[in-house]
Image (cartoon, rainbow, N blue to C red):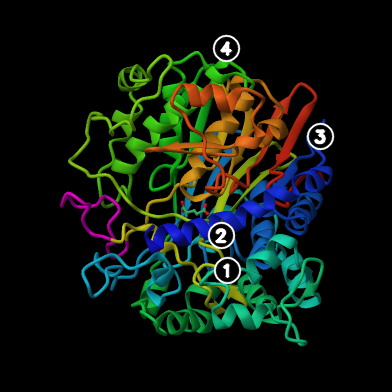
């Protein structure tokens, strides 16, 4: 097994430990119900959810609340996201029924080069080496993106949105079991000096679940961000500290103050496509959104809705559509500012129909090749690794505006290097380590100065054909995000499940030759039935790494869901 695979397995099996807590956690996950237009917050940590609810209670908008939730998540779930990371947001404006997308993806510094993750032996660096390196860090974009979105859709003063984060950092926040587990795990990032120092108590032991942890440096940073906006991070003393820390060995990076100052988040229309009686919207590439739409487009050519979650055929169709989706995603996606991505071709109804026809009626064949959609250049299969440290939030405000936002430091604790009380991302390891693919073709996801690495994050918003909100959801999980989100969309839209039940459905990631899954969670007979059709589910491969959060509009009002595999909640103000 390659070092990259060993690293990934270690990381994913540790994440999987969370699943053993399912029954206890499930009891603490009441499905929130909001019959009136009060709104809802669903996120991976109750302290962060509370910060979002506080903003909604003060009359803040969904984007205002997202700022507060992110500020607290960066403190209480620093293994997943934070001030030093990046993000994609899909936003629904209740008044105009428009869906827009914000791109806060990290950029590679001007000094980055296509071979910066290649070793002196001409081979790609091991993931464990690259992940803690100085050069893994991209220019952080999450806060700049939130500032852009808040400038457009916020109601409260930006400076008022950080009070909970500041208070918790000053007075101490409750360490969750997941955080304590990540801090104590033998990941390369968890054993970095900054991480060890932060999570070690005066008596020399590591923080445990339930402990109070203070982070005065974080409090000072959010005070500065509250006062100055994203400039506080991208210019001045914190920017200088970021540059310095990324220039430390091993494998120093090239980031400069100019790189930080030049960072620009982006706003655009969301990419929306019909799915049966619905319309599903996601951010454009380099997010994974368009690939998720391809998965739905393939399933639209099947009768999956007629086969529920307790049928072999339902899961068979899901798995085979997923494989086709991943085959295309793994070949064609990258940053559209640098490589052309045949999104129109991939989502063309005729292409989807022809590709869905490749699904054999009852017997899975070998892994499918990528298709040849209109506009496709010559590309080779991508081998980018994507282990996970990421989180997803969904917020609905009293006016019905919606934020669906996936936010990340890439791997657990990013690089394990800290500045100003927060972790620096390792997002640039989401690039292809090799500038060329195996067969010598240039990688669509190769590193280039100013480029954004390919992402799997796919924050989704679902509308009806009149433009009214139906659902919003998303998940962390690296490559598996697409499968997690697709499963949940099928659960609520096709199988008519509640958001909570759809989130709790077993995960199944059918990609290439493998079918990673949670075999113990399927209804009786499914695992054997699938095996008889050549779909051999394998547990323990990280399929438990979802952190799905979502909301669903029902006749009884707004209902929420939080992934029992994590520690989050969905609550009303
Ligand atoms: N860095 C990954 C991406 O942007 C996400 C990793 C994760 O979900 O844990 O797609």
Instruction: Tell me the CA gap for discs 3 and 4.
Output: 28 Å
Q: For the residue labelled by badge 2, is the local secondary structure a helix, a strand or a loop? A: helix
Query: Is residue 444 inside the magenta stretch?
Result: yes
Instruction: Tell me the CA gap for discs 2 and 4.
Output: 44 Å
CB of mark 1 within 8 Å of CB of mark 2? Answer: yes
Between 208 and 31, the one lying in front of the other is: 208
Q: Which residue is mark 1?
A: 229
Asked if the beta carbon under badge 2 is closer than 8 A to the nearest atom of ligand 1, the reply is: no
Q: Position of residue 427 (x, y in %)?
A: 44, 62
**Who comes first in sequence, dot 2 or dot 4?**
2
CB of mark 2 within 8 Å of CB of mark 4? Answer: no
Q: Which mark is residue 33?
A: 3
Of the two numbered discs 2 and 3 in the rendering, the one whose residue sits closer to the viewer: 3
Q: Which residue is mark 4?
A: 306
Q: Which mark is residue 165?
A: none
In magenta, the rendered stretch is: 434-450
């Amino acid at each position: 097994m390659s070092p990259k695979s060993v690293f990934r397995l270690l990381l994913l099996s540790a994440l999987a430990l969370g699943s053993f807590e399912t029954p206890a956690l499930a009891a603490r996950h009441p499905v929130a119900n909001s019959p009136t237009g009060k709104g809802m917050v669903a996120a991976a940590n109750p302290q962060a959810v509370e910060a979002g609810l506080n903003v909604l209670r003060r009359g803040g908008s969904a984007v205002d609340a997202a700022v507060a939730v992110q500020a607290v998540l960066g403190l209480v779930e620093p293994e997943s996201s934070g001030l030093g990371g990046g993000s994609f947001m899909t936003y629904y404006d209740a008044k105009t029924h428009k869906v827009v997308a914000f791109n806060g993806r990290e950029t590679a510094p001007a000094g980055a080069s296509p071979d910066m993750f290649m070793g002196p032996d001409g081979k790609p660096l091991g993931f464990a080496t690259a992940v803690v390196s100085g050069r893994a860090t991209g220019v952080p974009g999450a806060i700049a993106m939130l500032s852009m979105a808040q400038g457009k859709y916020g109601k409260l003063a930006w400076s008022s949105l950080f009070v909970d984060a500041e208070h918790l950092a000053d007075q101490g926040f409750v360490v969750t079991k997941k955080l304590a587990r990540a801090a104590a795990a033998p990941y390369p990032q968890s054993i970095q000096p900054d991480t060890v120092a932060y999570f070690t108590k005066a008596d020399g032991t590591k923080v445990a679940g339930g402990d109070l942890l203070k982070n005065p440096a974080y409090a000072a940073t959010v005070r500065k961000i509250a006062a100055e906006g994203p400039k506080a991070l991208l210019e001045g003393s914190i920017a200088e500290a970021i540059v310095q820390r990324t220039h430390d060995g091993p494998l120093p990076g090239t980031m400069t103050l100019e790189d930080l100052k030049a960072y620009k988040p982006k706003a655009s229309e969301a990419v929306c496509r019909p799915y049966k009686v619905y319309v599903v919207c996601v951010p454009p590439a380099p997010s994974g959104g368009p690939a998720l739409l391809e998965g739905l487009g393939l399933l639209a050519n099947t009768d999956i809705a007629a086969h529920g979650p307790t049928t072999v055929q339902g899961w068979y169709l899901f798995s085979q559509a997923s494989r086709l989706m991943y085959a295309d995603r793994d070949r064609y996606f990258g940053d559209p500012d640098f490589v052309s991505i045949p999104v129109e071709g991939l989502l063309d109804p005729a292409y989807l129909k022809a590709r869905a026809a490749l699904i054999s009626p009852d017997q899975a064949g070998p892994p499918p090749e990528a298709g040849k959609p209109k506009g496709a250049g010559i590309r080779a299969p991508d081998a980018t690794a994507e282990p996970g440290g990421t989180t997803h939030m969904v917020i609905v405000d009293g006016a019905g505006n919606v934020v669906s936002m996936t936010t990340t430091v890439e791997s657990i604790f990013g690089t394990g290097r800290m500045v100003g009380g927060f972790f620096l991302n390792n997002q640039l390891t989401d690039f292809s380590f090799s500038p060329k693919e195996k067969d010598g073709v240039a990688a669509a996801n190769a590193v280039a100065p100013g480029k954004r690495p390919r992402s799997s994050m796919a924050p989704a918003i679902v509308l009806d054909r009149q433009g009214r909100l139906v659902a919003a959801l998303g998940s962390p999980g690296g490559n598996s995000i697409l499968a997690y989100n697709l499963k949940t969309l099928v659960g609520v839209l096709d199988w008519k499940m509640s958001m909570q039940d759809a989130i709790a459905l077993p995960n199944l990631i059918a990609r290439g030759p493998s079918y990673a899954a949670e075999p113990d969670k399927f209804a009786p007979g499914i695992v054997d039935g699938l095996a008889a059709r050549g779909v051999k589910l394998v547990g323990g491969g990280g399929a438990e790494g979802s952190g799905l959060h979502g909301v669903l509009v029902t006749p009884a009002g707004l209902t929420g869901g939080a992934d029992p595999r994590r520690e989050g909640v969905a609550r009303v103000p």
